[in-house]
Image (tube, rainbow, N blue to C red):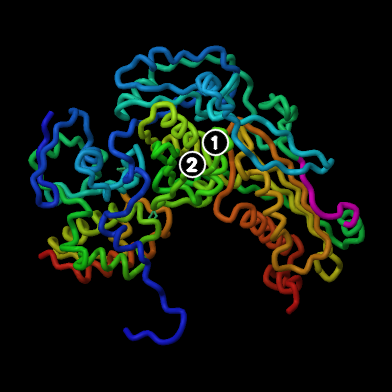
Amino acid sequence: MEKFGKSQSVERREDDRFLTGLGQYVDDTTPEGALHGYVFRSPYAHGVITSLDVEAAQEAEGVHLVLTADVLDQAGVAGKMEASLLENQDGKTAPNTDRFLLAKDKVRFVGEPVAMVFAESLAQARAAVEMIWLEIDDLPVHMEVGTGGTPLHDLAPDNVAFDWAMGDLAEMEAAKSEAAHVLSFEIADNRIICNSMEPRGCWANMEEGRLHLCVNGQGVWAQKEQLANMFDLPASEIRVTNPDVGGGFGMKAMSYPEYFLTAQATRMLGRPVRWMSDRSEAMLSDNAGRDLTSTATMALNADLKIIGYQVQTLANMGAYSGQFAQPIQTQLFSKVLTGLYDISVAHLQVTGVYTNTTQVDAYRGAGRPEAIYVLERAMDYAARALNVDPWDFRRLNFIPC
Amino acid sequence: MKIAMIVNGKSVSREVSDNTLLVEYIRDHLRLTGTHVGCDTSQCGACVVHVDGQAIKSCTMLAASAEGAAVTTVEGLAKSKDDLHPMQVAFKENHGLQCGFCTPGMIMTATDMVARYQAQGKEITEDAIRHELEGNICRCTGYHNIVKSIADGASKMTTV
Ligand code: FES
Ligand code: FES
């Protein structure tokens, strides 16, 4: 059919390759002869490590290297992952809790990497992982999205990762006291697992003295900088590439322990090394999304105009603060806090909490869909409570144009 | 052990361990990487190939079980780079793919489904397509355009 005018669809350049099986996803580009990495993950949600025995794994057939926190230490790799930290309400920076590439002293969630084996074949790497023996002293687990419980981190005694706020609380309180109606609603936004069809993966190789990390990520620069910091290398000695990626959804934007470990293995062994997550591992180790409970409070005048809007949120960080986790339900959430409505007084307070679960980080829109979800649910609930049509209620409160 | 089969019309033979899966044989030994692995639970369908004319999940079959069989992977579907299979064209024209990771499995499932329905003289309704896709998961598209693509591809495919 002849098409006329602007806005005609543009054909995708990549489709011919994808349709004929010539896509180049990360594991399609693994260098010949690469060793296979496989991760030993904590089967326990919370505990103090009393012993980690990797001797049998080291001696198993085909095994070239077993990385543990101790081995990294000896290699001079500090192993602490980077996280963006917020400024708390009291002006102090949120506690800089540790997240190591491989568990040191404690395990804090089921699926946490404890050791990584590199072997000739994947089957050998898996078999060797079966020979690893981890013993822990159990600690009570903290699963509830709330403060308190057995602390995961010494620096966060109440399991409070951060306490962040924006807006003028006094003005908000004044709006509430002037209001004809004050309505409060609790709105839960459950945790999701991202589940990109292509799981996470990477390979690393030393190329003319330069470290090359090929990872199915969503950009290369942050990754490169983090590798440089982790290994204390000049950035010029590192090359990071992204091949075709089988779905990212924000989940693949962040760095993960396995990428550093794979890179470290290639540095120690001087040969290519690859790691692909399987689906079960993805469920345990990929950054999760959402997982917050908000209480939205609306102050309305007698004409049902919103004169104040307040949100208090408990945001689950999981066991660790991920690379960009803290700014999501706070700064990013705040960008669209009041949506399309004419609301002049607003206040947002968020408490980030640590729990014995997989870390939570960016996922599809990161913070902004969550804010809109809370707001629009609250609009519906309020309309129902006030016995007015939800559309009329919205029209009444839209920013006029 | 030595395992031989015909893949995309060519006889191949490789020395592999006896527990090698068909998908490993295809990806790691033949280096035909169009067939993908998206799970370890036989659920996603990214690994679908045809074995003796039937769609199967290659992650769920031992290479040894395909000894002597005729296997078609997504690489074997187009006559040439410029002469794509009608189902491939339909996916392209209907935006039936985004990241493309599920796509090889989708296309192999689709061509099998159409061939079966046409052989039985049955109409491929939208409902039938959706039902037939129960073993293939896509995380990007929301399926609507995949279903459209398959219906379009079916109208252009003549297998009988
Ligand atoms: S890899 Fe075969 S069904 Fe998922
Ligand atoms: S197109 Fe990405 S999973 Fe289907």
The relative height of residue A236 versus residue A338 in the rendered view (above or below) is above
Question: Callout 1: residue from which chain?
Answer: A
Disc 2 residue type?
A: Ile
Circle 2 residue: A238
Is A221 situated left or right of A212 in this image?
right
Would residue A204 be visible to someone looking at this image? no
The residue segment tinted magenta is A163-171
Q: In the image, residue A276 lies at what x, y percent?
A: 39, 38
Quadrant of image for the N terminus of chain A: bottom left
Q: Secondary structure at mark 1?
A: loop
Q: Secondary structure at mark 2?
A: strand
Question: Callout 2: residue from which chain?
Answer: A
Ligand 2 quarter of the rendering: bottom left
Is B55 situated left or right of A304 in this image?
left
In the current view of this chain or complex, which residue is farthest to the front? Answer: A208
Quadrant of image for the C terminus of chain A: bottom right
| Residue closest to the eye, A245 or A233 | A233
The relative height of residue A160 versus residue A242 in the rendered view (above or below) is above
Q: Earlier in the sequence, mark 1 or mark 2?
A: 1
Q: In the image, residue B69 lies at what x, y percent?
A: 10, 43
Disc 1 residue type?
A: Leu
Residue at figure coordinates x 42%, y 41% from the top left:
A201
Q: Quick one: label 2, few (<14), some, or many (20+) residues within 10 Å?
A: some
Circle 1 residue: A233
| Residue closest to the eye, A68 or A167 | A68
Q: Assess whether residue A198 is covered by the magenta stretch.
A: no
Would residue A248 be visible to someone looking at this image? yes
